[in-house]
Image (cartoon, rainbow, N blue to C red):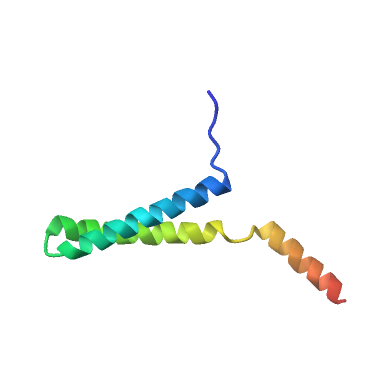
């Protein structure tokens, strides 16, 4: 069976969709905060949104190996 690989672009897209869905759920449930189910859904969606936002941020950071190579090349150029 063919193994699915989640490349960086697919991960970025999933993170964006997750952020959109959880932000939408947070906004919709904010209107019904007196209802216990809606309040719990609001809290869970808010926490999930924070998780998706953190994941999205991490996906856009440069890889450490590339960053270290750039730093070492800049320091060698300065000398």
In x, y percent, where is residue 48? 35, 56
Residue drawn 21% across and 60% down? 29
Residue at the far bottom: name it. Answer: 79
74 above or below 22?
below
Residue drawn 51% across and 48% down? 11
Q: Is residue 53 left or right of residue 38?
A: right
Q: Could you say which quadrant of the image residue 40 lies in?
A: bottom left
Q: Quadrant of the C terminus?
A: bottom right
In this view of the protein, which residue sits in the foreground, 32 or 54?
A: 32
In x, y percent, where is residue 62? 63, 60
In x, y percent, where is residue 55? 47, 57
Q: Is residue 55 left or right of residue 72?
A: left
Q: Is residue 25 left or right of residue 69?
A: left
In x, y percent, where is residue 31? 18, 64
In this view of the protein, which residue sits in the foreground, 40 or 16?
A: 16
Residue drawn 39% across and 57% down? 19
6 above or below 58?
above
75 above or below 40?
below
Q: Could you say which quadrant of the image residue 34 lies in?
A: bottom left
Residue at the far right: name it. Answer: 79
Q: How many marks?
A: 0
């Amino acid at each position: 069976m063919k193994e699915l690989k989640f490349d960086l672009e697919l991960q970025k897209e999933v993170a964006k969709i997750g952020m959109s869905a959880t932000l939408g759920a947070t906004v919709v449930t904010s209107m019904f905060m007196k209802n216990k189910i809606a309040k719990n859904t609001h809290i869970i969606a808010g926490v999930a949104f924070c998780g998706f936002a953190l994941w999205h941020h991490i996906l856009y950071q440069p890889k450490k190996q590339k960053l270290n190579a750039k730093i070492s090349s800049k320091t060698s150029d300065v000398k």
